[in-house]
Image (cartoon, rainbow, N blue to C red):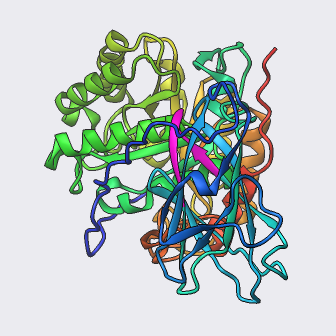
Amino acid sequence: MALRWPVLTLLPPLVAAFLAVPAASADVDAADLGAAAVTEHQAESATISGGLVESNHAGYTGGGFVNYDNATGSYVEFTVNAPAAGTATLSFRYANGTTTTRPVSVTVNGGGATSLPFPGTGAWSTWSTGTATVSLAAGANRVRATATTANGGPNLDRLTVDTATTGVGRPADVNGQLRVCGVKLCNQYGRPIQLRGMSTHGIQWYAQCVKPASLDALATDWGADVLRISMYVQEDGYETNPRKFTDLVHGYIEEATRRGLYALVDWHQLDPGDPNANIALARTFFTEVAQRHRDKTNIIYDIANEPNNVSWAGIKSYAEQMIPVIRAQDPDGVVFVGTHGWGSLGISDGRSEQDIIANPINATNFMYTFHFYAASHQDEYFAALQRAASRLPIFVTEFGTQTYTGDGANDFAYSQKYLDFLAANKIGWTNWNFSDDFRSGAVFKEGTCDGSTFTGTGVLKPAGVWIRDRMRTPDDFPTS
């Protein structure tokens, strides 16, 4: 249904490890770090590179403040303890007696850069606050504020960290272990939910778009619930280096978990379209992934991306062999299975959902997947989805607002028609794709992934602005 493409120049995969964090420092104003929701960290007690502790301007707290050197790269680094992984609000108390903004880059554990401007406050004795929302790991975190211009940073008094919402309200924390109940995806309370999120592009080409800063933006600025990890089997993917790509997937699962997102592991077979051609590789891959992550409650396994040029009976046979492979390691994990005709419920093959209804997969706790590209797949495809939704458990693991090539003009009106139906029927979705590919279906403008800014709409193409807006509305996750 959706074409996939190699890019002209292969881009380097993400190989950088996320840095370890040091032990907690003693300047946190709380006896029990693990229980504290709000903690204060005095700048003079932090690690300072390119700056001095001074006390010659009134109004500071503690024993003084840090006067940054007038140099790019000077920094103050705090050690912050979080009771659980999740988002937190950082408030930097500062003074800037000049009329020139003194921006800093705030990073957590070496990644997730956020720029804070620190404009002038009118006098060096007039103090103000700059805030940022970041993702923290459970335990100790290194929060570094680095000057990004030759003017250096402001005078920095202290950092206040509010972790009151850390680990609370995040999709995977609220909903816990999912299961399929009837034709719906249900949370740990047995209530139907809709998950909404993004699919990566092929991680063999666009791994640089999946890094701490972009994932922070996806979780907090976009408000996503799920990250689909698109690992191609062919097209320079898994079969070329199984160890490398399996390790990449392991890393992405951990990063999604740290941010309270569900991790949808996508076995992105496309050519050959018969998933049975790769079944030996699939057994190896899913055995390891399910074994390593079996104790997590945020893993979903998608065992066949877009079967094509294969009968429904062939897909059913593959699924009935692969689901037990996963169940042997992770008895509770939800499994997704692609439908024939490139995930179209058979429509793109001249068939229909009746093939599936008449010959369903013999298993439990699984869902069938559907893909659409709104500028190409309209009334016939939409009608098939409508018919199937009351008969089959369905999740839309891939869709775009463009044509099936992932390019061309956006049809936002028909896209909205689909999303309205999916919302009304609690059918989850992930949009294609979270990259800066030149095509219109990639949400970021070209070159964005080489940088560290992913929040807001300035870095987005029209499709990115549109889909981000549809994720930022509050989710309804019932808990009773």
Dominant SS in magenta: strand
141 in magenta: yes
- Find residue 186 and report its image quarter: top right
- Residue extending farthest to the left is 240
- Per the rendered image, the range of residues in magenta is 134-144
Taking 138 as reference, is 68 above or below it? below
Taking 249 as reference, is 435 above or below it? below
Taking 89 as reference, is 384 above or below it? above
Residue at x-position 67% and y-position 74%: 154
State how many labels appear: 0
Q: Is residue 414 visible to us here?
A: yes
Near-viewer residue (315 or 23): 23
- Find residue 163 and report its image quarter: top right
Location of residue 158 in the rendering, given as x and y in whole percent from the top left corner:
69, 56
Near-viewer residue (405 or 142): 142
Location of residue 365 in the rendering, given as x and y in whole percent from the top left corner:
52, 15
Q: Is residue 268 visible to us here?
A: no
Near-viewer residue (105 or 389): 105
